[in-house]
Image: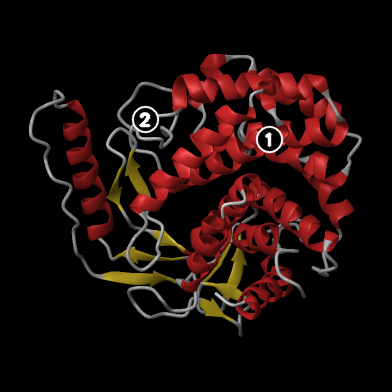
Amino acid sequence: MTDEAIRELVRLAANGLGRMRSVEDPLLFAHEIAGKDARPRGTSLRYSLMVLLGTSRAEEHGIDCRTDRKKLWRRLLERVDSPQLTRGDVGLYLWNAARLGASEGPQLLQRVKTATENVALLRSLEGMEVAWLMIGLVEYARVFQDDAARRLAENIGRFLFDEMVSLSGLLYQHGKRDLRRPLPNFATQIYGLLALSMAARAGLEDAPERYRQAAVRLAEAMLRSQLSDGGWPWIFSADEGVVVEPYEIYSVHQDAMAPMALLALYRLTQDARYLEISRKSVDWIFGQNELGQNMLQDGHGFIFRSIRRRKPWDRLTLWSQSGLAIVRSKLPRGLPRVPNIPVKTPVEINRTCRPYHLGWILEAWSGVVSK
């Protein structure tokens, strides 16, 4: 992908956020925009936190997103006790506090402490939320030279290695021993990769090599599962290290989340492959996908959310493929394996967009290419 195409993405993200504000509270951002009129629906504190991170990164590099970040931060702090938020979202708060140099950090750190010192609570969180907690702590410790945040980050690191890293290198969906645990999604993998890469750079436990090796193993396991057109699949079998169900294939994974983590790994390892893969991942957005569809909608200032199976094939295929994966994982080692057979069904464009997508584009690519 050329620098100009990436600049186009960044411009679209910076300009498109204005249309994605919540109707209920214009300081915050909507849950999504949808419908023929592309109108904002609902309000999402989580997505607003992600947008704040992205716009802060963009403005560090001179990109005007026309967002009053101070007012947005104050409104998010007012809503920190909202039932809409999970314990993992506190990691996004702490990450923002580090990015903004915010004085509210100690109170947020105490919230994270409560969430991270109880292993049962950590086990209840999805892998992506565990990753957000680690990223928030690592960044807070780095910016403020805070030993308490560093110790908490090391606690989460031990939890990841003890309970989340599978033999294949992929991460389990969560620490609970249930049927979903061995069937993680892409979000858990990619945020986990970002967390491991950032922890390695931070030198947690004075043993960054352990984190670096885990990050590389995870990245290589994901690359082996990447689809032929560059798409990033959705559901994996962590124990087998294979794809269970590729759909939905999300645009945000292609142009934002995968590059965000792979660029962090590139900065850690200086392996140029990860930089090149980040660029090629974006090609999928510009029409190099199975439908030949350019996912950018410049007139509306957003990007179509995904390519997905049509109903009812979406649920039927997910359930059947997941069931087969669970059966395979229970078979004794040494027996012939049940093959993982791809299922072909009609697919369609999911013509919605969520504001965090634009926020993560800004986080991933601001400053990577010249304006």
Residue receiving disc 2: 181
Q: CA distance from mark 1 to mark 2?
A: 22 Å
Mark 1 crowdedness (10 Å alpha carbons): few <14, some 14-19, many ≥20: many
Q: Quadrant of residue 356?
A: bottom right
Mark 1 / mark 2, whichever is N-terminal? 1
On the question of residue 82 being in view, the answer is no
Disc 2 residue type (three-letter): Arg
Q: Position of residue 321 (x, y in %)?
A: 21, 46
Q: Quadrant of residue 221?
A: top left
Q: Residue furthest left?
A: 336
Please give left or right for residue 240 compared with residue 220 in the image.
left
- Residue beneath the point at 36% across and 30% down: 181
- Residue beneath the point at 59% across and 24% down: 157
The correct choice, above or below, for 280 with respect to 52 in the image is below
Q: Position of residue 263 (x, y in %)?
A: 61, 54
- Residue beneath the point at 75% across and 57% down: 25
The correct choice, above or below, for 294 with respect to 322 in the image is below
Residue receiving disc 1: 91
Q: Secondary structure at mark 1?
A: helix
The correct choice, above or below, for 276 with respect to 323 in the image is below
Disc 1 residue type (three-letter): Gly
